[in-house]
Image (cartoon, rainbow, N blue to C red):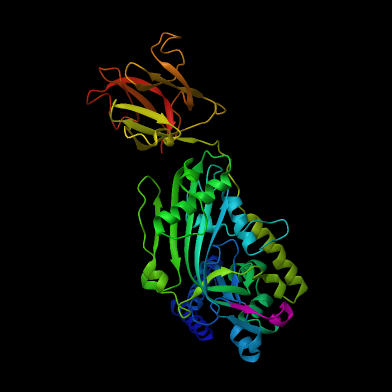
Amino acid sequence: MNKNYYLLSCLFLAASLFFGCSKEEFKLNDLQENSNSLSNRISLLSAGDGKNDLLGFGYDITGEYANSSAAKFPVIDVDRLQSEQPTRVIWDLSKKQEGKIIAGKNALDYTKGLSLRVDAEYTGVTPFFKATVTARYKDSTAFSSKFVYSSFDLMMIQKRVKFNANNAMLMDYLSPSFIADVSNQSAAYIVNNYGTHILKDIVLGAKLEVLYRSETSREDKIHAASAGVDVKVKAIFSINTGYSYNTTDVKDNFSQSLHYRTWGGNPSMQIVGEMPLGTNTPVVNIGSWQNSSTVENAEMINISEGGLIPIYDVINDPVKKAEVKAYVTKYLSDNQIHIVNEPPTRMIYRCYNASTNGRLLTVNPGEVAGSSSWQVEGPFAKIYPDNSIAGTIALHRFYLPNTKTHFYSNNRNELGPGNGNGVYEGIVGYIFSANVPGTQPLIRYVDNRGRHMFSVGFNELGWGTGGWMYEGILGYVIGT
């Protein structure tokens, strides 16, 4: 680890001399970008080094959970500590495989679960590991109140490395660069280059990391999130998770997506991907990668409970310690997740009856389960469960005995009161009466036998084709 650090330091210095930057040309933000890049390279070189991996390195707890991407420059000179006091660096070579699900009703709630996993608490500021979400969901919807989150980690544990030393002892083994920077650099520089905490107890091995997200109309959102990742992991990776959820538990989930990747093991067998989850679920074989995990290619896959030391706890100077602590507090506060409250929606599905050539719009695709005549065509549109959103109107459902099909209208009285033309079955949900940004028209068509077809947008049937005649726009819905 020290040799790698020395080599990269020399390369960095040589590059600076080669380009001949003056003080004026070499801006502070350039220095910070270069230091961040260099610290990441050093961290990556140490990750999976077959020895102590990232033990003693700085770590930014706003980054990804138990991930080398959040590691910074080394704070503790672990090689010297291990050489002079071998019993102070402990290697536990016990091997096992375990899986863990963490779920939350939104991104904030989910990251609280991650924070509790390592007992990472900080007075007045929680939770942490924001980048676990933002590294995978980069758009503005990441923190929407509509989405539940859950993750499943399958860990092949090869080794655990930790300090058997208190903070006072570790302060005798600080890296020379950390000592110099504490004396000469600002609190912001220290946190930027060394992170908010120090890794003191970490688990090494290989890990399959799966992050699941969906909307749901289920009241118990934690249950919906836990079931979602469990059912999909079983289907996609053929893994026995140890949990007993089934497809019934996820019937109210929609707008589902999943990100996955592996860490550790043979790098040439690494698996990474993302997918929207619909009716057709792909299968991913992780067997070869899983069998490639050894103690030699192990890297950090977890942080043990209590396995982090606040960076300021190893600073002896009381003034600088207070400055760094204050900066860490502000930094963590500035990087909190703020949930964007949005009204819940429901997914409606379009189903087709081959016997009657009729269509059914329903929020519950299980309504036609077990019927050989019906097939679920797929997610159709999103609607609101109530009229709390300004500008929405009810979408009414009727059954037409004459054609044995269903009929939908934005007017409860369109078929006439009590004339026997249709049996009223209730309100499906609420749609916009006028076009608003992010919506598409819900269009109704009819054929010459009085059967109806419903489409979102004009791409499917346009102004009428294939025997379907355009009847009009019922309202506006949110696309899938």
Residue occupying image coordinates x 77% and y 73% = 318
In the drawing, does residue 414 fall left or right of residue 328? Answer: left
Task: Name which quarter of the figure residue 366 lies in.
Answer: top left
* Percent of width and height locating residue 282: 35, 54
In the drawing, does residue 272 fall left or right of residue 10? Answer: left
- Between 95 and 102, the residue placed more toward the observer is 95
* Percent of width and height locating residue 341: 58, 40
Query: Can see residue 66?
Result: yes
Whether 298 is drawn above or below 422: the answer is below
* Percent of width and height locating residue 188: 64, 66
- Between 83 and 73, the residue placed more toward the observer is 83
Residues rendered magenta in the picture: 161-171
Residue occupying image coordinates x 38% and y 36% = 370
* Percent of width and height locating residue 32: 55, 68
| Residue 163 on the magenta span | yes
| Residue 119 on the magenta span | no
Whether 13 is drawn above or below 68: the answer is below
Task: Name which quarter of the figure residue 290 lies in.
Answer: bottom left
Whether 428 is drawn above or below 281: the answer is above
Query: Can see residue 137?
Result: no
